[in-house]
Amino acid sequence: MRITTTDTAHYLETGHYRLTVSRTDPSVELEGWMTLNLLASVNTAAGRDETYETLPPVLDRRDGTVVFDFPQRTTGWEAKTVRLTCTPETIALQVRVEGNGVLSDVTLMGGRAVLNTRASGTFRTGLHARGVFSPTPAHPIQVVRPVSVPVALTVVGDASPGRLHAVFSPPPLVLAFGKEAPAGATEVPDGDWLGASVRAGIADLTFTELAYEPLDGGALLRFDYEGHTEVRGAWTSPAVVFRAASSPWEAISHHRDDLVTHGLAPEGPVRERHAWWSEPLFCGWGAQCARADGRSPVELSRQDLYDEWLARIEEHGIVPGTIVIDDRWQLTYGDPEPDEAKWPALREWIAARHARGQRVLLWWRAWSPEGLPAQECVTDAGGRAVAADPSNPAYRQRIRAVMERLLGDLGADGFKVDFTQWSPSGSHLKAYGTAWGPALLHELLATLYDAAKAVKPDALMITHTPHPAFADVSDMIRLNDVLEYDAAGDLVPAVDQLRYRHAVATRAMPGHLVDTDQWPMPSRADWLAYAEAQPELGVPALYYVESIDNTREPITGADLRQIAEWWRR
C-alpha cells in the first residue's frame, strides 16, 4: 500500500482500490464507487447521538494495515471515534464509543451532526453505483434493485405488506453495489461490483435488522438494536467491510471467508454428514394445500392422507428417502405432542417407514409460545407470551425432554425448522437473557440442534438460515417458499428464483446440503420446470401429488413418472 499526504488529504493506493481521505471533512472518496461519509450515530434509549465537532483524522500504520481514526465530539457519549482499517484488499468501517447507555439504533456511512461548517441534520454517503444486490428473497422480487430502493436484511418478517423480506432469516449480511442498471427480476448485470458486508460473530449480532436506507442520491446503513444491547464503559460496532468483487456471488464468498478468517463463523458443518440426508424428500404441505378446498391446510396433516399420497407417487416410481410431516401433526407448537385424532399411530407409522428404508422428519414452528408457560417465553408489556425464550434454562430443559420424546420414543429422524423470521422484536419485550436478534435466534436453534443430536446423532436439522455463522446449528439449508411477482406485477418463473436462492445459499454455506423446497407453484408448467432443475441444485423435494393449489391443474401419472426419471438421473 502506498500513502502520500498533502495539507488537505491523505492518498492511499493499493492494487485493488484508491482512497482519498480528507483532512478537513469527515469524508473519504473511494474512487469509482462512493464518497464515504464518516459520520456515525450511536443512538440510545436516552436520546439521539449527534456529532457537534469533527477532528482531523489520525493516521497509523499497523502490521500491514493502514488505520485512519476520525475523532468526533458528540452529545451522546464521552468519546466517539469512527475508524477505517485498510488492507490491500479491504476497507473496514466501524464506530467506537465510550460511556454508558442502551443502544436503540446505530448508523454507519452517515449520521446526525452539526458540521464545522454549521451545516446540520442527517448526512449520508454519496453512491456512484446504479444497482444494489440483495441476498435475501423479498416481494416484489428484484434481486438487483435500483440503488435508490431500500433493502432490509433481518430476522423479523411475515407475508404482510412491507415485511416479506425474511424468507432467509438471517441471510448473509452483505450487499453488493454495481455499475449497471438492474434488468429483469432475477438477472444480475455483468461488470465490476463492490461488496459491503458485516463482520460480526454471533455474540455481536444483537440487532434485529440491518437496513440500507437511500435518499436523494445518498444512503446510510442502520442497525436496529431495539434497546436490548447495553454499553458499559466502551463499545465497538460491527465492521462494514468493503471489497471489490467480480459479481455479487463473489461478494458473498468474500463475506463468508472474512468471517471464517476472523474466527466468527465455522469453516463448514460441525457434524458428520450422513448418506440418507441426500435422499430426495417428500413434504406433504403442497398436497395439503391442494386438497384443502376452502379448509385450512393444517387440518389435512393426517396419517390416512399421507398414506394415500405416498401410495400414489410410489405407484408411479417415486419413493422418497425422507418424508416430512408438515403443519399440523402436533397438538401445540411450543411443546409438541402428536395429535392422535390425525395421527393415531405415529410411532408405528414411523417404524413402518423405517422398515421400508425411509426416514421421517417433523415440521417444527420456531419461536411459538403455544403450550408454554409465560415464564419460559419472551413477554410483552402486559406479561403475555410472545415467543419461546431459549435464554431461559427452563425452556432449554423442556426442549431436551421434547427431543427425547419425539426422536427417542416416537422414533422421528429430525426436523424441518420453519418460521425463524418470527424472531421477537420490540424495545419493550423482556427475555431471561441478554441476547437479541440473530444472536437469540442462534441460541434457539442451538438449543434444538444440540438436544436433537444428543438423542440421535444422525438427526437431520433443516433451517432457512444461510448466514455463515449459523453453520453450526443446521445440516441443510432450505430455500423456502417461492414468491410470485416482480415490481411491474409480472410473474417471475419459480425456477429462476430457485437458481438465485441456490447461488446465495451455496456461496454463504458451501459445505451444507440444500433443500430445494417446492411451494407454492404458480402453475403446473412452472412446477415441472422447477422439478426438473431441482436434482442439479440440491436435494429434490416433491410437494405436490394430485393438483397445483394455485390453478387446480391436475397432476397426471405421466407427470409423476417424469419426476421419477429426473430423480433417477
Image (tube, helix red, strand yellow):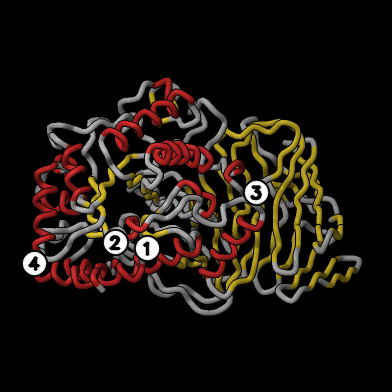
The kind of residue on which mark 4 rests is Thr
Residue highlighted by disc 3: 238
Residue highlighted by disc 2: 484
The kind of residue on which mark 2 rests is Glu
Q: How far, Cα to Cα, is label 3 from label 4?
A: 53 Å
Q: How far, Cα to Cα, is label 4 from label 1?
A: 30 Å
Chain-order first, disc 2 or disc 3: 3
Q: Are marks 2 and 1 in contact (CB under 8 Å)?
A: yes
Q: Of the residues tagged 3 and 1, which is closer to the observer?
A: 3
15 horizontally vs 546: left or right: right
Q: How far, Cα to Cα, is label 3 from label 1?
A: 29 Å
Q: Measured from the top left, where is residue 18 in percent x and y?
A: 75, 72
Outermost residue, front direction?
A: 355
Quarter-wise, where is residue 191 in the image?
Answer: bottom right
Q: Of the residues tagged 4 and 1, which is closer to the observer?
A: 4
Q: Of the residues tagged 2 and 3, which is closer to the observer?
A: 3
Chain-order first, disc 3 or disc 1: 1
Chain-order first, disc 2 or disc 1: 1
Chain-order first, disc 3 or disc 4: 3
Q: Residues within 10 Å of mark 3 (few under 14, many from 20)?
A: many
The kind of residue on which mark 1 rests is Ile
Q: Residues within 10 Å of mark 4 (few under 14, many from 20)?
A: few
Q: Measured from the top left, where is residue 527 in percent x and y?
A: 21, 66
Q: How far, Cα to Cα, is label 2 from label 1?
A: 7 Å
Label 2: element kind: loop
Residue 141 badge: 1
Q: Which residue is at 64% across, 52% downward?
A: 263
Residue highlighted by disc 4: 556
